[in-house]
Structure formats: structure tokens, C-alpha cells
Amino acid sequence: MQTPVPEYLAHVIDQCENNQTGKLADYIPELAHANPDQVALAMSTVDGQIYAVGDEDIEFTIQSMSKPFTYAYVLQQLGLDEVLDKVGVEPSGEAFNEISLGHDKRPKNPMINSGAITTHSLIPIKDQLESAEIIRRFMSELAGRELCFDEAVYASEIKTAYRNLSIGYMLRTVGILETDPVDIVNGYIRQCSILVTVKDLVKMGSILANGGIDATTGKRLLNRDVVRQVLSVMMSCGMYDAAGDWLTTVGIPAKSGVAGGILGVLPGQVSIAAFSPRLDEHGNSVRGIEMMERLSRDMGLHLMEGTPSAQTIVQSHYRTGKNASTSIYVLRGVLKFTEAEMLLRIFQGEAVDESTIVIDLTQISLIHDVGKRMFLEGVDRLIDDGHSVLLVDPEQRLEQARTHKDRVLHVYQNMDELLEK
Ligand code: GLN
């Protein structure tokens, strides 16, 4: 059989294709040459499966969707405090290109131009590369292919960059920018001119959705706390003065760009990218919003619709052996605080005696740090009660399986190995 996901995505495109409202961005003259009817949609799962339909191979400039990635880059390089010194995290409720600052003189957030120009100025220069080239390389690594600049769009935006230049001079006046604002604005505009397809965007987004790890290579590209910071800011500020509307209707951390792209990232689940060039009054793609709204509604992707996961932590529990003295727990899903709490509550039901408890972690897909700590604490307490505890974990995710009381647990590769003993 074939998965219906691509057909479903194509259906979403069909449904929005009649919508011809909105206008091309024309303050960047080159963008006014885009074909307004183009439309594409892509989705990536956290394990790296990409689905894409429509004009999926059409390249367009990333524009403001570059902002979260540059923010991620500088956070990764400099740490949160140094970045927070220069750029805030409050939604501005203003247009993306507003010439304004917060009361403390910092730009309100890194998703509007003033914040993004500031973020760009923080890129540590290495190997004498230009700042935009450093970002192009970083984004290429996330996308898993070599991305290029669109020289025509870059040149066109530079020619009419009066507004971004005034923002640059304002930032320089208050000392937020510490070097020549013209160079920094140039670099920022070049960063915005990187060409991507919806497939590139979902690939880049999937690394954020996957907590910073590239699922196809297994390589960690961003720290978990960096990803959390970036997604939080995307959630509150990514859609500018339409952020509240977006949060209630779509509920997916997202970022739009004036070439018509929107990238949404749902932590732990999917990344979605939509593209169609006509924009609404906020500078967000009209069809892009419509497609994202539909996907969120139809597939229950709204962040606030989180389903309780803990109920499934114990997939099965049975007793075996002489006098049913061995208790076997088969676990499933993700082991975080809520699941660990539920599990330890279930373990409370084990009588204080010398019976054996087997815990099979084979089907646990992720063990969060707090989940691991609580789990090992629970094991210690079971042992204190007189039980012997045996674990099955083929991936050895508890590392040395050393409990807080420094007991080293025996970990079996699989149930068969354990039963042989
Ligand atoms: N390069 C564009 C600008 O600075 C990006 C804006 C956007 O995509 N919203 O105006």
C-alpha cells in the first residue's frame, strides 16, 4: 500500500488554489517578478521522512525565515546571556520592519528586523569569512545540501534598503550595534537572500523539531536549550503583529518570509513548510496561512492540543515464574517527567518482598534526563524493598545503568537472553 500523506497534502493545496487575494512584496523590486500562482507544501517527520507536493522544487529566497536560524547560530556560539544582553524576547505587536526599540533600548525580539539585524551583528567571524557566508554554510548543513545566494534579489533589496538602514543607524546610535551599520545591514540582507525550496525548509525545521539532532545523520547540530529558546521565540513573535491570531488558530511555532514562505515546527512531531508568494498586510503568505490552518485543524497539530502521553507508559504487565514471583513490565513511548511519575506510582503497588522485577525498555523511544533520574531512583527503591531488578535495553540508554546508590544494574540485550539465564 502507499501512504495517503502526499495525497492529503495535495488536497490541501487544491483547496487553497482558488484564493488569489494578497499582493506580492514589491518593496524589494525583484520579488515583484515572482509568479504569484506558485504554491508548494512539504512536511518532514522527526525521523527524517519528507513529503512534498506542488511547486516543491521551486527555489525562493528565505527572507525572514532565516531569522530563527541565525538566532540559533549565535545562541549556540555565544550562549543565551550574551545574546539576551542585545536582543529581547517580547512580542512587539508591531510590523516586522518597525523602526522602534524596547524601553531598555534593546530590539524587542529577534524575529523583527531590528532584532534580526542585531542578531546578525553577533555572528562571530571565523576564518575571515563574511557573516552571511558563515550563515549560508550553517543553513546548508541543516538543509543537508549546499544552499546559494540569490544575487539578483540581494542586489535589488540593497538598492532600496532605506528602512533597514535607518534601523541599523538607530541601533548604532544606542550602541546595540558596535560596528558600521551599513556592513551589518548588508550582511543581514544577504542572509535573507539565501535560496531554499519547501523541502529544504522542512529539513532545516526537522532539526528543530527533533531537539537539535539531524535524524538522517544522527549528528547533534544544535543544543537542546538553544532549540527550546528558538522555538519559544518563534511561537510568540514569529508571525509579527499577527502572532496572537496565529497562536490561537494554528498553534505551531512558525516564521514567515516576504518571498511567500512559512515554516512551522512542532516540537517532537513534524515540521511543515508552505510557499505561495501573495502576502497579506502583515507580510505573511495568504495561501501559506490557509494551508497551515487547515493542516493544524485536520491533523490536530495545535500545540495546546497536546494529548496526555503518560497513560501509555506501561504497555503490558504480567507475572510469571514459580508462584508468579517475577513481575514483568513492558514499557513503551517516551520517558519524561509525567511518564516517570506514573511508572513509579505503578511500582508502588509491588509488595515489599524478594521477588524479581523485569523492566523491558526496548520500546521506549526516548529517555529524557529527568525521566532517567526518576527511573533509576525508582529502581533503587525497589531494590531497597528487597527486589532484584533486571533491565532489558538493547540500546543501553541508561549508559552504565548505575543507580543513585551506585548500584550497577544488569542490562540484558533482549528478553530471550534474560530468559536463558
Ligand atoms: N529581507 C526582508 C526585510 O528585511 C525580510 C523581511 C521578511 O521576510 N519579513 O525587509
Image (cartoon, helix red, strand yellow):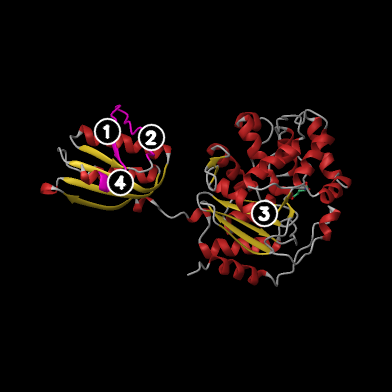
345 vs 412, nearest the viewer: 412
Q: Which residues are magenta?
A: 396-417
**Amino acid at the residue labelled 3:** Ala
Residue beneath disc 2: 399
Q: Reading the chain from its start, which is encountered first: label 4 or label 1?
A: 1
131 vs 313, nearest the viewer: 131
SS for callout 1: helix
Q: Reading the chain from its start, which is encountered first: label 3 or label 1?
A: 3
Q: Is residue 408 magenta?
A: yes
Residue beneath disc 3: 242
Residue beneath disc 1: 380
Residue beneath disc 4: 414
Q: Reading the chain from its start, which is encountered first: label 2 or label 4?
A: 2
Q: Position of residue 323 (x, y in %)?
A: 10, 48
Q: Reading the chain from its start, which is encountered first: label 3 or label 2?
A: 3
In the rendered view, does 317 fall on the left or right side of 245?
Answer: left
**Cα–Cα span, label 1 and label 2:** 16 Å
- Whether residue 3 is visible here, answered yes or no, is yes
- Judge depth for marks 4 and 1 and give the one in front: 4
SS for callout 4: loop
Q: Position of residue 398 (x, y in %)?
A: 37, 37
